Each structure stands twice: as structure tokens, then as C-alpha cells.
Image (cartoon, rainbow, N blue to C red):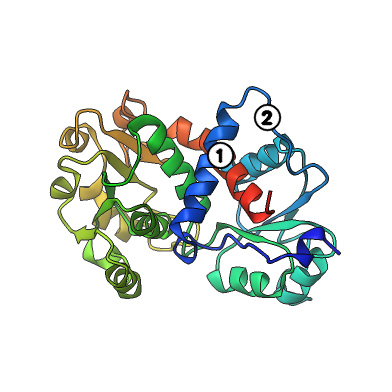
Amino acid sequence: MSPASSRKVRHFIDIHLLDAGSLRGMLDYAAALKRAKQPEKPLLGRTLALIFEKPSTRTRVSFEVGMRQLGGEVITLTGKEIQLGHGETIGDTARVLSRFVDAIMLRTDAEEKLHEMAEAASVPVINGLTDKSHPVQIMADILTFEERKGPITGKVVCWSGDANNVCESWIHAAVRFDFELRVACPAELAPSAETLEWVRRNDGRVIVTRDAEAAVAGADAVVTDTWVSMHHQDAERRHALLKPYQVNERLMGLAQKDAIFMHCLPAHRDEEVSTAVIDGPQSVVWDEAENRMHAQKGILAWCLNT
């Protein structure tokens, strides 16, 4: 049985399910590891299982390299290689894997699959992405923001586009890290009433508007994402709705002069963001991509109680 099973299990399911102190600790440790000339290897002898039901570039490479740099081992599986939810329940798969590995990362579609795995596993389960949220990405984004702009507390971040799974995790982060988030989006693609009610109950500062220019004005960072994701079937309609929310030079010009542009990638150039912006001096998208690895080191170390 995995050594982690004898201790209280620390899952990383969603940002809003964790307290601010734990989240800050993960990022502080990630930043310290990134600065270290001789990286620590606190996960020597530990093994991480990566399960991908959705394709990935940054998530796979960043978790694999990050775990190995911490001294651990990785086994990577796809939905086609294992009987996840077909031929065997997700819970039974979680129970079996818990006997072999010390942590599980799942990248999937339905949020319910992630929760089912976490409920059954006796080792930490990490959300590598669902259709509902993408918390590991936003942890890397906060790390990137603070490298460029200092503490994010009290700052203003603007999201322009579909209030998708990445935006959902930005909303969670706005409450936990105490900054203002302005979400500019068409009414049809706005955050859910349930999410906004959670923000209200927690005294968060999240403003939803249809006016992209008003949302960007004076912002410290401007963030967007692709208009059409893997599970969307209505590409033409979505493009029509989201065209006014493209992040281009004119829109970026309304933000603070030293504002940064962020995108989780992959990007569709000259759709949600102009080539001039993503390749311009305010863009930090490559830093974000690198910081996926560093932020995930902090998450892994926290989950495994190092």
C-alpha cells in the first residue's frame, strides 16, 4: 500500500476547495524551488500516475519533468490504455492505483469523474483539467503574474472571452488571493449563477460585464483563452458571439502601460488574440507555460506532505 495512505490525504481538486494559506504555501515553495541552484529532491522514491482522457502538451510534459526533477518517477496512461469507467468503475481504478502509486493526476471531461476518483483513492488526486475547471493552470498564472508584477493581492485582472473552465478557476483564485477580476463576456457565455453566488458568499470582487473596453481599462493583466474547446460543437456561433472580445493592440492599449497579457495556450492567433499581442512585449505566455512545471512542483510537494 502507498505510504501516503496512512496519512490524511491532500487532494488538489479545485482552488475554491482549499484555503488561502495552503495555496500561498504551494506558490511560495514553487518560487523557492525555481530560484534554487541545487534543486531539492523531496519526492525521491515516490511515483505519480498521469491519466489523460483528453490530449495534452503542457500538462503532460510539465508534470512529467517536474516530478522527475523532484526525484520521483512517473507512469503515464491514457483512457484507451486503462479501464477507466468502462469495464471497471472509476472508484475501483482509483483503489487499485492507490496500491501502486503515491499520487494520481487526472485530466478528463466530466468533473464527476474527478470527484469519484478522489473519493475512492487513498492517495492524493490532482485535477489536471476538467470541463468545469483548470486549477493547475491558474496556479502557474498567479506565479507568473507575481514574478512580473509583484503580489497579486489588490490588483486588477481582466478576462475577455468565454467564461470557460479556465475562467472558472480565475474566479476561484480572485476570491482566495484577494484581487479584482473583471469578466468581459457575452451574456450567453457568462459564469454560472452558482459560481457567482459562491463569490458573493465569500465577499469576492468579481465583476461580470458585456463591455470588454470597460473591463480592460486600467487592468494589470489581460487574460483570454480559445473560443472553441475540444468539447464544443457550435464553433461558428461561438466565433460570432466572441469576436468583440478579441484581445488586440487597441484593447491592450486601454490597460495599464505595464500590463501583461496571459493565455494558457494553445492559442488560435488572430482569433481570440492578435498575433501582435501574443508576440508583443507585454505577452508572458511562454513564462506561463514554463511555470506550469514550477507551480505543479509546489502542488505535488504539498499533496505528498513534504
Rendered residue at 49%/52% (across/down) = 23
How far across and how far down the image is residue 213, in percent? 14, 46
Residue at 64 percent of width and 49 percent of height: 300
- What residue is pinned by disc 2? 39
Instruction: Tell whether 223 sits left or right of 300.
Output: left
Q: Earlier in the sequence, mark 2 or mark 1?
A: 1
- Amino acid residing under circle 1: Ala
Task: Count residues near mark 2 (Cα–Cα under 10 Å), then give few for <14, some for 14-19, many for 20+.
Answer: few
Q: CA distance from mark 2 to mark 1?
A: 11 Å
Circle 2 SS class: loop
Q: Residues within 10 Å of mark 1 (few under 14, many from 20)?
A: many
Circle 2/circle 1 CB separation < 8 Å = no
Residue at (26, 67) in percent of width and height: 188
Q: Is residue 233 left or right of residue 275?
A: right
240 lies left or right of 16: left
In the foreground, 57 or 180: 180
Name the quadrant containing residue 210.
bottom left
The residue lying toward the viewer, choosing from 279 and 31, is 31
**Residue type at mark 2?**
Pro
Considering only vertical position in the picture, is 155 above or below 189? above
Where residue 98 appears, as percent x and y from the top left, is: 79, 65
On residue 259, the disc is none
Viewport quadrant of the N terminus: bottom right
Answer yes or no: is residue 143 visible.
Answer: yes
- Seen at 17% across and 32% down, the residue is 253
Q: Decide: is 6 above or below 244.
A: below
Where residue 256 sits in the image (x, y, percent)?
19, 34
Disc 1 marks which residue? 30
In the displayed structure, 176 sits above or below 42; it is: below
Residue 264 visible in the current orientation: no
